[in-house]
Image (cartoon, rainbow, N blue to C red):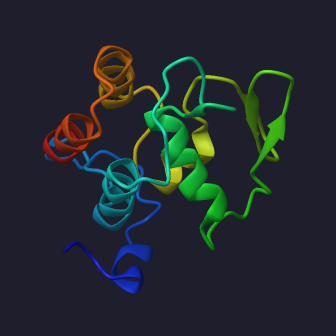
Amino acid sequence: MGLTYSESSHILYSTKKKKTGKIKKMNEYIKYQWVYAIQSNEYEIINESLHNENGFSVIGILCDLFIKSGENTVNAKWINKVDYHIFSDNFENCFSEMPSSVSNWANLMPHENFFQEISKFSDFILDKNQIASYINRKG
């Protein structure tokens, strides 16, 4: 079922690529939480922005998990605008892109192909099980 919280916490912020040339993987505990959240009825999947009155994008769900986590040390929160919400922390405001604080928390960098792929994939496929399966395979 993935890693326990304590097991995942000491690998959480590893952001370097190993010298072996292998691409680092997403934190397994966070990936498990993300996939579970996507498949739950708690979140409605959208593709217009990270979060609006209709729901959350796939990346927006990950952002929301970060905000709710006990590891949100950058004062991250949603700022409500008229038709959407902006992810805001001590360093940046994001409307549709992956915030660096969230990608660091999940052990991935925002420029990695995975986030570009998941954004494109979820723009066309809003089936929660297909998105979750994709994240499990690629993340």
Quarter of the image with the C terminus is top left
Residue at 82% x, 47% y is 90
Q: Is residue 59 above or below residue 7?
A: above
Q: Is residue 97 left or right of residue 28?
A: right
Indicate the quadrant where residue 34 lies. bottom left
Residue at 32% x, 56% y is 31
Q: Is residue 112 left or right of residue 63?
A: left
Q: Is residue 135 above or below residue 98?
A: below
Q: Position of residue 120 (x, y in %)?
A: 34, 16
The count of marks equals: 0
Indicate the quadrant where residue 5 lies. bottom left
Quarter of the image with the N terminus is bottom left
Along the line of sight, the residue nearer the viewer: 124 or 23: 124
Residue at 42% x, 53% y is 41
Q: Position of residue 138 (x, y in %)?
A: 18, 38
Along the line of sight, the residue nearer the viewer: 99 or 16: 99
Residue at 38% x, 62% y is 33
Q: Is residue 91 above or below residue 70?
A: above
Q: Position of residue 47 (x, y in %)?
A: 49, 21
Q: Position of residue 98 (x, y in %)?
A: 54, 32
Q: Is residue 137 above or below residue 32?
A: above
Along the line of sight, the residue nearer the viewer: 30 or 82: 82
Q: Is residue 122 left or right of residue 75?
A: left
